[in-house]
Image: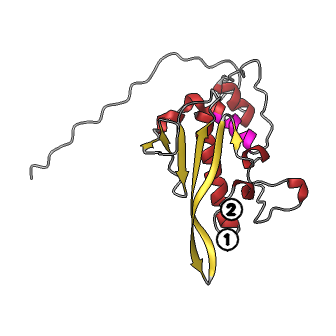
């Protein structure tokens, strides 16, 4: 389910980019229009090269995606696509999930708990909380054709703030700033002086 929502967000972003890039045409009304092979030349209205080839074919990660119900408006006598709907329906033999998802040019995502396209339930933002962050990033990289970086096996060493300060400024916080030798240690705290009470004007 998480993957389907990520794909819909990716498609919404691609639609917005396509409409801005080709304002005389507007939104794309077919998935292949958002795809295209980068080796075939520069992006063009019928092949904007904004999504991967498998997504442009309509299926990814156990879901079938479709753009439909495109709305048009005449602008200077030319038909421009000003609205669309996208659905994500799980395949019958898929283990990806049992919800159907829908979105449109407003970029709000709703779902159908029965797995169809009657999307009436709003998607809760917590559904894609931080615990899915790495999965979302990897999915976005996959959709954009980017390599997924390998995570280091050992966690990075946290540098002491005093060592980092010395690296950045060349000044050690461990040495006396006046005699430039010895080591400074914490011996206590100076209490913040209390303000004297205000004197009332009795004149």
Could you tell me if the residues under marks 1 and 2 are in contact, i.e. CB atoms within 8 Å? yes
Q: Does the image show residue 176?
A: no
Camera-side residue of 64 and 131: 64
Residue at 52% from the left image edge and 41% from the top image edge:
116
Residue holding disc 2: 18
The percent position of residue 150, horizontal first and vertical second, equals: 79, 27
Dot 2 alpha-carbon crowd within 10 angstroms: few under 14, some 14 to 19, many 20 or more: many
Magenta stretch in the rendered image: 136-143
Q: Does residue 82 appear in the picture of this structure?
A: yes
Question: In the rendered image of this protein, does residue 23 appear above or below residue 34?
Answer: below
Locate the N terminus and report the quarter of the image it occupies: top right
The quarter holding residue 63 reads: top right
Magenta-colored segment: predominant secondary structure = helix
Residue farthest bottom in this picture: 76
Residue wearing tag 1:
25
Q: Specify few, some or many for label 1: CA neighbours under 10 Å numbering under 14, 14-19, or 20 or more.
A: some
Q: Is residue 141 above or below residue 80?
A: above
Q: Quadrant of residue 189?
A: top left
In the image, residue 2 sits, relative to residue 85, either above or below, namely above
Task: Name the one closer to the observer, 174 or 176.
Answer: 174
Front-lying residue, 173 or 123: 123
């Amino acid at each position: 389910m998480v993957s389907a929502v990520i794909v819909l967000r990716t498609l919404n972003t691609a639609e917005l980019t396509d409409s801005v890039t080709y304002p005389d045409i507007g939104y794309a009304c077919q998935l292949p229009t958002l795809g295209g092979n980068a080796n075939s030349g520069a992006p063009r209205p019928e092949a904007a090269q904004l999504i991967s080839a498998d997504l442009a074919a309509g299926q990814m990660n156990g879901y079938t995606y479709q753009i439909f119900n495109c709305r048009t408006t005449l602008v200077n006598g030319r038909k421009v696509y000003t609205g669309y709907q996208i659905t994500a329906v799980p395949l019958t033999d898929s283990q990806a999930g049992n919800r159907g998802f829908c979105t449109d040019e407003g970029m709000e995502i709703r779902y159908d708990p029965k797995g169809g396209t009657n999307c009436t339930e709003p998607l809760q933002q917590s559904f894609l909380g931080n615990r899915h962050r790495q999965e979302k990033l990897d999915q976005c990289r996959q959709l954009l054709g980017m390599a997924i970086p390998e995570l280091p096996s050992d966690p990075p060493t946290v540098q002491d703030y005093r060592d980092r300060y010395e690296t950045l400024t060349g000044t050690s916080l461990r040495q006396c700033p006046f005699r430039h030798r010895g080591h400074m240690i914490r011996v206590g705290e100076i209490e913040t002086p209390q303000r004297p009470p205000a004197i009332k004007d009795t004149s």
